[in-house]
Amino acid sequence: MTMALWLSMSANAQNSIRLIRNATLRISYAGKVILVDPMLGEKGTEFSVMKVNNNPRVNLVMPVSEILDGVDFTLLTHTHFDHYDSVAIHTISKDMRWYIQPEDEDVVVRRDGFRKAVPVIDSVTTDGITIIRIRGHHGRGKVAEKFGPSSGYVLKAKGHPTVYVMGDCVWETETQQAVSQHHPDYIVMNTGGNIVLPLSQTDGPLIMDEIEAVGMIKECTETTRFIAVHMDAVDHCQTSRSILRNQAERDHIDMKRLHIPEDGETITLR
């Protein structure tokens, strides 16, 4: 084994994605710890979208102190409460570095006081990691108009796998082009099939459901691996882990390519 290969394998062994809850992730990548879309509040402390059960529907499986320990910077796809809640706003240090979509600068910087937040227009490089923002749509038709802009991020670093965190973006031209251009080794998909009535009755869910997620997997290369999140945590989420798994198995998806982690589970990136 050459020294270069050994170094590459050693570096990749440190790369992992831990699902905290919903779309909140703790990513260890290229020697840095990245927090994604922090929803840190206790069960039932946020409003109910469906006017039935307060959100989040489930408890955190670890203390907030553990989630935030050693975090180098935070990625924010958008500022909806199930990605950026009041506990995150009041608990995370105002000196934390954030990388955000430009549309959220007024909220994150001016309203909430995160003075080191950086709007990513196209891409930025920090700590040897290139962060590429991928514009997307939070649903289709009037759903997308109502719920505003949402972004995803591609993470690249020399000697490390390429990771695409899609955020609340559906599978369409922008996201398809991102996959074709950047060839991610791993794609984190938000697959809860979240709905809001009555708009979703005509224009579909806010994010991918099990049908769209399985279709996306089929369209991507066989070497791409997928991590499905944003399920079983908020009351407007229609696609559960079991529903997604059932659909994937029915459509003969190789489950070695599709990871459906439980809250608190860590997936090592190879």
Image: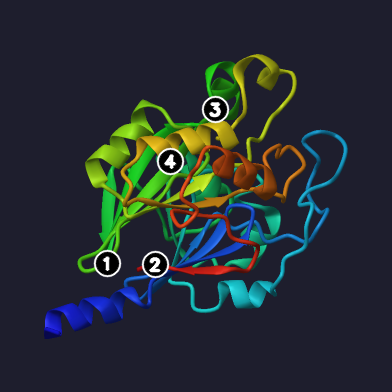
How far apart are the alpha carbons under marks 1 and 3? 31 Å
Point out the tag, 4 or 3, that comes first from the N-terminus: 3
Q: Give, as a three-letter code, the residue at label 1.
A: His
Instruction: Please report contact status of discs 1 and 2: CB closer than 8 Å, yes or no.
Output: yes
Please state if 63 lies on the left or on the right of 153 as rendered.
right
* Vertical order, 148 against 201 (above or below): below
Discs 4/2, front: 4
**Disc 2 designates what residue?**
269
- Which residue is rendered at x = 20% and y = 66% of the image? 158
Q: Quadrant of the C terminus?
A: bottom left
Residue nearer the viewer, 108 or 202: 202
Residue nearer the viewer, 244 or 71: 244
> How packed is label 4: few (under 14 Cα within 10 Å), some, or many (20 or more)?
some
Instruction: Please report contact status of discs 4 and 2: CB closer than 8 Å, yes or no.
Output: no
> How packed is label 3: few (under 14 Cα within 10 Å), some, or many (20 or more)?
many
- State the image coordinates of residue 6 (x, y, percent, origin top left): 20, 83
Point out the tag, 1 or 2, that comes first from the N-terminus: 1
Instruction: Please report contact status of discs 1 and 3: CB closer than 8 Å, yes or no.
Output: no
**Disc 3 designates what residue?**
139
How far apart are the alpha carbons under marks 4 and 2? 18 Å
Discs 2/3, front: 2
In this rendering, does residue 95 appear at all?
yes
